[in-house]
Amino acid sequence: MKKTWQTIVGAGAAIAMIASLAGCGSGSASGKTELSFFANNTQDVYQPVIDAFEKKNPDIKVKFSTTNGAQAGYQQTLQTRISGGQLADVYVAPPEQLSDLVKNGVAKDLTNESFMERIGDTNKAQASVDGKVYAMSITAWTNAYAYNKDLLAKAGYDSIPETWDEFIDMLKALKDAGVEKPYLEPKAGLGALVEGWIGYDSSKQSKSIDQQIGDGSSTFAKSYTKYYKEWAKLFDAGVMGSEVTGLADDQVRSEFAAGRLAVMPSGYWDVNTFKDAGINFAFGRMPMLHKGDTPYAPGAADSGYAINAKIDGAKLKAAESFLDFLSSEEGLKLIQDNMGLIPSTKNYTPDIDETFKEPYDLYLKTGNVYLNTLGWPASGRSALRAETFAQLQQVALGSITPAQATANLDTKLKTLS
Amino acid sequence: MTTQHIPAAPADAAPAARGLSLSQRERIRSAVRSVVVIAIALICAVPLYVVVINTFKNSGDMAADPFGLPTHFTLENYTYALENLPVVQATINTLIVTVVGVFFMVIIGALAAYGMVQKRSKLTAGIGAFLMLSFVIPGQTLLIPQYKMEAQFGLVDSLLGLIVLYLGGATFCYFLIVQYMRGLPGELFEAARLDGAGPFRIFWQIVLPLIRPILITVVVFETMWTWNDFMTPNIYISSTEKQTLVLQVFNAMGQFSTNWPLFMTITTIALIPVFLFFIFCQKWIVAGLVAGSVKG
Amino acid sequence: MSQATAIVTASALPEAGAAPARAIAGSVQDFEASHTRDRKRRNLMENLTSVRFLLPLLAVYIIIVLIPFLQSIVFSLTDYDGYDFANAKFVGIANYQAIFQDQTLLAGLGFTLLYTVATTVLITAIALPLAVTLNRKFFGRNFARSLFFFFSVPSMAVLGLVWQYIFSPLGTGAVNTFLGKFGVSPVPWLSNPALAKFCVIFIAVWAQVGWHATLYLAYLQAIPADLYEQASVDGASRGQQFVHITLPQMVPAMGVSIFMLLTGGLKVYDLPFTLTTGGPGNATYTVTQSIIVTGIGSGRYGVGSALGVMFFLCCVILVALQQIVTSLIEKRLS
């Protein structure tokens, strides 16, 4: 017994030694400028881009690090690292955090950099604070309706109709034709398409509707209620049920991939999954409220690349040539091929998968995308967005009306500012 | 093996008369127990089955039917994970962090528990209550202060930094062990002290072997937790060569969507070692104590 | 005690044997004085030894937990945004006032309490008999023990996904497919507020029961075997043995397990968040989710910290109550 314990203790101590030795290994690569890069996507998709860049710039070594997804995980980690003074030289700056990053002086002003000439106006506008651009956003995303061609054909349709009422008629026709689930939205994406409607209505005003809510000149109750009422027609018409309040993205995608669901809100990122599933599908428009409305969809510029404002000298030069490379034709092609993001710069026309042609032409080529959170006060955007889904879930359950939902959003907004 | 295994025999039955009928009855009982317990365990294990079965599918196949057997059986996820991810380096890192971390956590916790049961006074009671507070502090509020502190000492992005944070788990070890120690008969310590043994010797030679069931339980809990922890290395580790095994699941999480079959594959690869570790350890949780030492 | 008695006897005897009554009386006084001095010194020494053993843990605890927590108390009085603390301004108790205006927080408090009580009761009620069963001999025991323990080991991200498929409100969800075979129409598991609460609690019990059974299993080893031997000689049945020996002997273990469940339950976040994101509506919203969503995750670290501090205070009260109740039960039983 005694021996056993001594062995265990000895082994533990030995490993402790090894660990402390292992802690102080690996020196830095000699003579090269090391550029640290913190991204919100995986290493395997970035590695080809980094390899190509290092090949062109043999004196620079990129030290890559990442954390998961675009959502809270990345933002939280970025924030924590900044609080400890551990920010990378180049990093991805999510639009939600941009104003905080600028306020804390960690994002360099990129307005007059030569590579910014390639960047489209929508992308620039989203990465700007007080008229100055702080991040280089080179890609964009949009929602679109993915539809199952075979199921639509059952009701005699071959594409998504232009207006919302026609769309609901189509869903009814599908249901009559025996499609049990014509349309589903995920619980954390309920009512996403109202953002397209708000985007179009905002385009006719000098300030977007959500900016008006953000600065207090309008309220959710005044401006959102009519959109939510239109959306709630899905339940009145019986084409979507309250079960959506318990369906995550993955379940909705599964229904579609299994060929049981006719239409779902989706995006370019789903192309490969649907192809693997072997269904006959395409991506189409998201219907507008009235005939003749310019099509808009929920979407935005992707997070841009920012340079740490605290670096200078050779590091800064290296950071600038890295951004220059990312926005070059070669870099954009690599980004599209490896990450499945859609380049939206002036110097490059991407090849788009044919199933995604319609939404690309309608929304990304024109820049007719809209994201409501961008108009809201920076602190509390994500909390407010989560609240919109919580409220719409209650509308879906029939426990509150659209008008009550928007009133609750106003209350929430007050507690957040 | 099981010292508590007591046959439910009539009290008046003489040892010789217990004979066949009893062992037969016990055998039937044990068979029934096997069937019932294993059936329940298997039903409860369905989610684990789902995780494993989907490692042999591609995304489309899984999306179309998450529960069924693969329509096109593939080992692609495994080959991808093993060929493209730094599995070996990550395993070494995880091993170092887990072994060193758990070792110190448990020793610190056990020492403190021993100190606590040696003497009950207002001072120790106060310290005990003070230590309990750590269980009700929401961890999320500690995130930034802890990170700032580690950054000040140059501990971020190092395995040592992770180990230091994991030492916080010592309070948990302490708490589980101290209750157990209180249940031990005090005469044992007393006898050893009369033999002239110092407190450290008593700790090593008498106390540690006596608390082995809880010690191994605590080692198992902490190993699982450390091995499997995602939050801490996610925030603290930025160098690829210092990543732990669980962090490799990132490679399945894109910016907009997650490759679930790959995610599950990496999870499976990362968890096989701890599963084996548990099967190995659980025998020791119940493998009888030093015979007779608890008696009287 | 015996050691102390030995010393006393040794020092007192020679005097007592040789001296007259007065001297004896005096020496007794002397003895008593020296005895108390001695005891005081011994007390101090014993305190010091025991504290010496506690020092490493105290150091770890103070550095890793307490100092950061004190810092976050400071944060809670400022408008700190989580980036550079030098830019933060002192705002007094404004953050605390803001908390009480948030209605979702109240919803979160309700479910958090329900979750805590329900999981504590259910897990204790299941884990204890499970541990007793797993402690008996049967074929496949090691396998069963390992399996029960292992349910909760894969990350919540992946388990949450799998359970979402199992409890999917669609007809194609696993449970609904099964029920459908008996002609039951799809049950809105995760899309009905009451059922969603049930699902979250059910999965929490599933995930943790093996863990707590393992803990009980360890404690079962410390029950002296002769208690059972004596009982079976007295003709007690297994059920009686469980009630009269196992249960009372397991009170300390239950104290530990329940304490873990209470504190873990109050802090719960992962499971409801990945499974339901707090929904439908706010049905499964938790306090910790509130700390994260409205505080830390929104760059309002001050508010998040204030929430954390308030939450801490509430937990202290609840847990103190639990401790008092447990020690009362232990006292009555011993």
Image: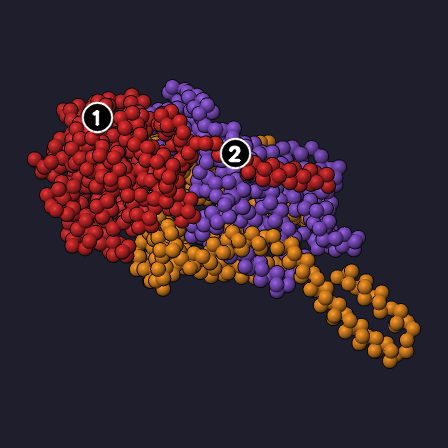
Which residue: 61% across, 63% down? B123
- In this rendering, which labeled residue sits more in front, label 1 or label 2? 2
Is tag 1's residue or tag 2's residue first in the polypeptide sequence?
A: 2
Q: Secondary structure at mark 2?
A: loop
Q: Residues within 10 Å of mark 1 (few under 14, many from 20)?
A: some
Q: Is residue A1 visible?
A: no
Which residue: 26% across, 34% down? A115
Question: x%, y% of residue A197?
Answer: 15, 40
Question: Which residue is outermost to the right?
Answer: C18
* Mark 1 chain: A
Question: x%, y% of residue A116?
Answer: 24, 36
Depicted A229 relative to depicted B59: above or below: below
Which residue has dot 1 on it? Answer: A349
Question: x%, y% of residue C126?
Answer: 51, 45
Q: Nearer the viewer, residue A161 or C231?
A: A161
* Mark 2 chain: A
Colour-to-chain, red: A
Q: Which color has been applied to chain C in this rendered view?
A: orange
Q: Where's the N terminus of chain B, which quadrant?
A: top right
